[in-house]
Amino acid sequence: SWTCNLGYQKNEGACIPLVAPANGYVQGNETKCFAGFARDETGACRRLVVPANATVRNNRWTCNPGFVRSEDDACKKI
């Protein structure tokens, strides 16, 4: 068995370089999105839509203290 070097992936018996998506980067043997971006259903890195009274943390957002996430993805005062 063999493995590819970091930054490459197996494809039909060969090692090909990983290509970072727009707004993303290669880390080890995978691609990741920059902070403030998250993968969509196509695998692209899309900017997070952050509601009022929320803070971005890495690839997701959380409501600020004193607020709770509602069913409509807003941050409502507790």
Image (cartoon, rainbow, N blue to C red):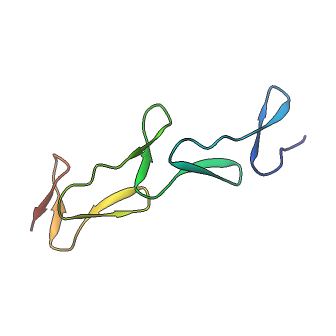
In the image, residue 63 lies at what x, y percent? 23, 64
Q: Nearer the viewer, residue 74 or 24?
A: 24
Which residue lies most toward the left here? 77
Direction from residue 9 to residue 24 in the image, left or right: left
Q: Residue furthest top?
A: 12
Q: Residue furthest bottom?
A: 65
Asked if 21 appears above or below 27 in the picture, the reply is: above
Q: Quadrant of the N terminus?
A: top right
Please give the count of numbered marks on the rendered protein.
0
**Snapshot quadrant of residue 75:** bottom left
At x 81%, y 25%, the residue is: 12
Residue 78 drawn at (x, y percent): 9, 68
Residue 45, percent from left and from top: 47, 43
20 sits left or right of 55 in the view: right
Residue reaching furthest right?
A: 1
Residue shown at 21% from the left, 55% from the top: 51
Residue 66 in the figure: left or right of residue 22: left
Residue at horizontal 78 percent and vertical 52 percent from the top? 6
Report x, y in % for residue 3: 85, 44
Residue at image x 15%, y 73%? 66
Q: Considering depth in this image, is 33 or 62 the residue closer to the camera? A: 33
- From the viewer's perspective, tell me whether residue 35 is left or right of residue 69: right
